[in-house]
Image (cartoon, coloured by chain):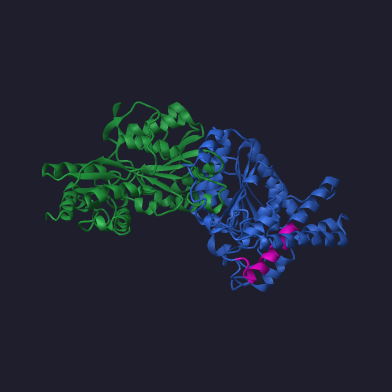
Chain colours: A green, B blue
Amino acid sequence: MSVITYRDALNQALREEMHRDDRVFIMGEEVAVYQGAYKVSKGLLQEFGEMRVVDTPITELGFAGVGVGAAMVGLRPIIEFMTWNFALLAIDQVVNSAAKMLYMSGGQFNIPMVFRGPNGAALQLSAQHSQAWESWLAHIPGLKVVAPGTPYDAKGLLKSAIRDDNPVIVLEGEMLYNTKGEVPDSDEVIVPIGKAELKREGEHASIITHGKMILVALQAADQLAKQGINVDVVDLRTIRPMDIDAITTSVRKTNRAVVLEEGWELCGVGAQVVDYVQRECFDDLDAPVVRVHQADVPMPYAKNLERAAKPDAAKTVAAVKKVMYLE
Amino acid sequence: MAKKKPDSPAPSEDVELRRDLLRSMLLQRRFEERCAEAYALGKIGGFCHLYIGQEACGTGAISILRPDDYVITTYRDHGQALARGIAPRAIMAELFGRIDGVVRGKGGSMHLFDRNVNFLGGHGIVGGHVPIATGVGFAIKYRGGDQVCVCFMGESVANTGAFHEALNMAALWKLPVVFIIENNRYGMGTALERASSIHDIYTRAASYDMPRGVVDGQDVMVVRAAVQEAVDRARTESTPTLLEVRTYRFMGHSMSDAVSGTYRTKEELEEYLKRDPIIVLRTQLQQAGQLTDDEFAKLDADVKAVVQDAWDFAEQSPEPPLEALYEDVLVDTTSDAHAEAAVAAD
């Protein structure tokens, strides 16, 4: 077991899977010579050469489509978006090509590929560079969507994504790349897609979240513990397909739920979680479910406004107290 | 690339070839005439875009290819699918929305795919399939193969960002892709001159320093010669080409608009009808004494029988079972069958 960064965990996953299968290649802006805009692909060009580590022009729609074409005829592309904000330019290829190809070809052409990159807000990057896209992407049948929040999950889910025979969206986080955690020194760190994990156990309430917000939830859990309130932190890890059993098991135990996400409220991932809870746990609930999310505004630049817009531990603590009728 | 005249003294294999091309184009024509009939009867639904008038483009280009080459195209895909050898029965059953359709009733007119003949689909978003073609070219080069990918599109695609991005990368990376623009003069109802600042579409390839050419798309032998040159360049030099093939759509854009419409005159249409690609080739063969009226009539009767057979087959094919609704959304990565397939692939 080593303690490594989220960035290095992703890098290990890429390297190991490229060794394992020569059909796997990575393509995107600055992935090769520059060693990755966030250094996730560091060293890969030197190790695997320019045919398998491919710098592209700034042309998201184009290189996303190149990945789809290569996947149609048997390769296993990893398409890196410098951030998911730029992927909006490529959304036609993600949605209309990658997600639909298997279905509209009557099962003849599957698309074994990965679209990955950082998602959500970092610090003071303002409106166009601070957006969490998971609810958009998870809406689409034909995709799988994962959002690892720890180095272990980052490595294990990226490896699963690369080995999957379907298009898989991997949502990373700029603020996560430097975070550290334990990862086994083994090639076989695999986290199955579609399985949530209980990151912390408690009995008073459940915080259901994913991705970067795991860190916020764990912070909130620490603060609550000091006040004698112990919470379950359910890390969805995969948004699509969602692990409904993990959600309902926790809520049936605690009878109270807070759903925390980085994105906006309307039609957010949390809305879907609440729907599962009301359908499956109606008689178990002791309070209405409360959601914590970004303020319903484009992300502002000023530090104080940005802080006000983002979900954080204090807002999460307040939400837990609300479902416990403590405030 | 210069326009090429077909060689006039035809050797015997050339006669055979021309007759095959004539048969293929005639099959496409008769097939689509029945599509229009079936659409009117409500047997075919949704969008349905006919290729009538443009048959020489796809037929000539595809006739150059090897079985292991790739073809990718737009939603106007029936003719090219037939030219590539997909069974008329499987296409008609697809159009009728039946289980024996080439994509099991999941795609319809716009989404014909057949892995057996490397037909990578009819794609419904204008420009969307052009980067995919570049990706197929990338995969060929990645594996060190000598196949070629031919990508068909209409002239309006040249105005999309996807086209620009895809051609830039294909030229930058020297990929074996032949981009064929079938310039039928209208993007739906908008004339080329009202949509593009450049009217010689093939010259756009200059932006990518890509070999380019323009040919008459109504003469199948002229199309063949031009595509042969481009395919050879792709196969032996791994260099892409942009080929503009000038043609004309004899029907409306889809089934919902009139044949001539508000955007073009009847006189213009009638002028182009004189250069029907089937008449052009038939006349060449007849003038060379290589086809009689009786032989043509027999050929026509043959293909009509094939189309009738496809129609009958489609009508008898069952609708997809309701279980099919949820099939093929994702590859099932949990089943034993999948694990076995993965082992076999490794």
Q: Residue furthest front?
A: A283
What secondary structure characterizes most of the magenta part?
helix
Nearer-the-camera pick, A93 or A252: A252
In the drawing, does residue B22 fall left or right of residue A48?
Answer: right
Nearer-the-camera pick, A271 or A202: A202
Quarter of the rendering occupied by the C terminus of chain B: top right
Is residue B26 inside the magenta stretch? yes
Residue at 18% over, 46% down = A313
Corner quadrant of residue B228: top right
Residue A168's place in the image compared with A186, above or below, is: below
Whether residue B163 is visible, yes or no, is: no
Residue B95 rendering spot, x and y as whole percentages: 62, 61
Nearer-the-camera pick, B309 or B138: B309
Residue B175 rendering spot, x and y as whole percentages: 57, 40
Residue A274's place in the image compared with B140, above or below, is: below
Residue at 74% over, 58% down = B27
Is residue B28 inside the magenta stretch? yes
In the drawing, does residue B4 fall left or right of residue B342?
Answer: right
Magenta residues?
Answer: B25-44
Residue A314 rendering spot, x and y as whole percentages: 16, 48
Residue A301 rendering spot, x and y as whole percentages: 23, 51
Corner quadrant of residue A191: top left
Residue at 33% over, 31% down = A8
Residue A107's place in the image compared with A30, above or below, is: below
Nearer-the-camera pick, A95 or A184: A184
